Image (tube, rainbow, N blue to C red):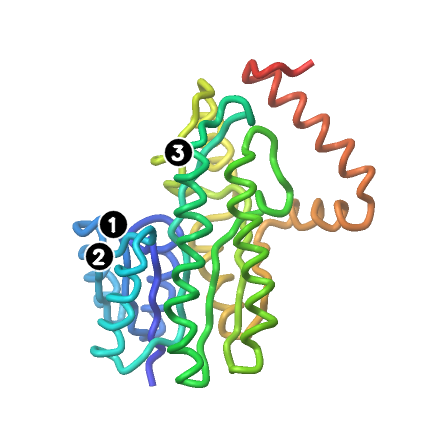
Amino acid sequence: MSKRVFITGGASGLGRAVALCYARSGAKVCIGDISADQGEEVARELTDAGGEGRFVACDVRRIGDLEAAKDDMVSAWGGVDVVINNAGVASAGSIEDTTIADWDWILDINVMGVVRGCKVFTPLFKEQGQGAFVNVASMAGLMLAPLMGSYNVSKAGVIALSETLSQELRDFGVSVTCVCPAFFQTNLTDSMRSGIPGIQQNVNKLMKKSDITAEDVANAVVRAEEKGEFWVLPHAKERRMWVLKRHAPKAFDWLMHQETKRWMKKFGTGGA
């Protein structure tokens, strides 16, 4: 039977790349997104790629949208095998400069959006006796880059939720995969909120310099989900830094402090 997949934020970027990766293997893939035009276009691309594409309007800030998406797929396909909580946004700024409104915005989408997705689909997975959650976090949730406090916290929250659910749901036949990429070319900065002049352009440069593509990350996601693996850490340099952080925390702390001072000086936020 063809795998049945639901992807939030699937109309662009990593979500689209993952959707196409599944579609090429003949999967039924439903795109949930706030952009109807892009979502419908990607749904057609999925069908052309060999799968069965579907689109539902879905804002992860509204649990009713996720419940409607679930009901739509159960009606059309009889169930769902994989839920990829991918929708996310970015923000940057120091603790003084990031507004509470921006904190509320990013946590509502990046953390609570994943919480809502997991909450809505867990009862269905338990009823089916099988299912897989793929939660898209970031190396930012493990490495905690400077001037990205709200983004770091949001992605660390996704990691914490994923680790928790991996334990809670395992005996029900439900696997959890947590995706933590570093920089790769995507459209994340399109909706980025920041009061720091030039930081979006700087992040875009780092994305463009990466030799890891959205398709590379997508392939790693699909492989990990199929094998029931928890971590997806596609960037070799950042994997090594994570090992350093765990096994030589003082050395990691020194390196990160030097990087923090460099960024704060570069962007005029009080660095020495």
Q: Going from the N terminus, do you reach mark 2 or mark 3 first? A: 2
Separation of disc 2 and disc 3 at Cα? Answer: 22 Å
Which residue carries the number 2 mark? 57
Q: Going from the N terminus, do you reach mark 1 or mark 3 first? A: 1
| Numbered label tally | 3
Q: Going from the N terminus, do you reach mark 1 or mark 2 first? A: 1
The residue under the point 40% across, 84% down is: 127
Label 1 close to label 2 by CB (< 8 Å): yes
Q: Dot 1 lies on which element?
A: loop
Which residue carries the number 1 mark? 34
Q: Which mark is residue 192?
A: 3
Could you tell me the amino acid type at mark 3?
Met
Separation of disc 1 and disc 3 at Cα? Answer: 16 Å
Residue 226 screen position, x and y as percent: 49, 74
Q: Dot 2 lies on which element?
A: strand
Q: Nearer the viewer, residue 204 or 230?
A: 230
- Badge 3: residue crowd in 10 Å (few <14, some 14–19, many ≥20): some
